Image (spheres, rainbow, N blue to C red):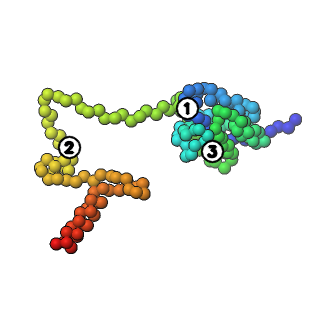
Amino acid sequence: METVAKRLYEAMFLIDSAQAAADWEGMLSVINNILQRADAEVVSMRKWQERKLAYNIGRNTRGTYILCYFKADSRRVSGIEKDVQLSEKVIRVLVLTTEKRPAEMIEKDINVPEEKVFGPPVVRNEPEKPTPAAASDTPSAPSDSVDAADSKEEEGDKVEKPTLVAASDGVAADDSKADEGDKAEAEEKEETAG
């Protein structure tokens, strides 16, 4: 009987974020089943990140990445990749050998604090919108941290604050500079006409 040396591999599994949020444990069991069919020994598995995909894969626009380290026979890695292609739950996989990767980096990835391993998917909350302050009967005292432009406006000087507008090429442009150019052109036309 031939003894086979198992090598350490790093795999990045990409799964649909919506499915991961709905059934996190189910998604992990799918990946574990794929690895068990290849007689792989899972060393570490954790959620790496949830991101917007650079391009749509099928109907998916967001994906959750699961980083996994496992030991397996090198002849069985192609079977893992084929199982992922046949799976409806796992979108993609990238399997790399860890031979050329420094041991310190591998240990750092494997020895992640327990609260980060198998944590539920991150739910993104919308940023809170500022709420208008409640009106009070007593007038508030002026703040010492008044913007210089605001203090000039109070004195009666009109200060133009630059605003950003979309330029034709999609890059934001400074609107105040465009106004200065228009004013200069108008002044030149008045001088030539008068």
- Measuring from the top left, give residue 29's x and y in whole percent: 65, 27
- Write the residue at 67% across / 30% down: 30
When asked about the image quadrant of residue 111, the answer is top right
First reached walking from the N terminus: tag 2 or tag 3: 3
Q: Closer to the camera, 39 or 14?
A: 14
Front-lying residue, 146 or 188 = 188
Q: CA distance from mark 1 to mark 2?
A: 45 Å
For label 1, count other residues whose C-alpha is less than 10 Å away and answer few (under 14), some (14-19) or many (20+): some
Residue 123 lies, with reference to residue 92, above or below; the image says above
Residue 112's disc is: none
N-terminal of the pair, mark 1 or mark 3, is: 1
Q: Rounded to the nearest whole Å, what is the CA distance between mark 2 and mark 3? A: 52 Å
Residue occupied by mark 1 = 18
Mark seen at residue 145: 2
Instruction: Where is residue 176? Give x, y as percent.
Output: 27, 57
Which of 73 and 131 lies nearest the eye of the viewer? 131
In the image shown, does 101 or 74 lie closer to the viewer? 74
Q: Nearer the viewer, mark 2 or mark 3?
A: 2
Res. 6 visible in picture: no
- Disc 2 on helix, strand or loop? loop
Kindly state the secondary structure of the residue where label 1 is placed. helix
The amino acid type of the residue labelled 3 equals: Ala
Q: Nearer the viewer, mark 1 or mark 3?
A: 1
Q: Earlier in the sequence, mark 1 or mark 2?
A: 1
Residue matched to label 3 = 103
Quarter of the figure with residue 191: bottom left
Kindly identify the residue that appears in the image at 27 percent across and 59 percent down. Answer: 179
Crowd tier of the residue under label 3, counting other residues whose Cα lies within 10 Å: few below 14, some 14–19, many 20 or above: few
Q: Position of residue 7 (x, y in %)?
A: 72, 41
Which residue is at 20% across, 43% downward?
A: 145
Residue 31, percent across and down? 66, 32
Residue pictured at 42% horizontal, 57% vertical: 169
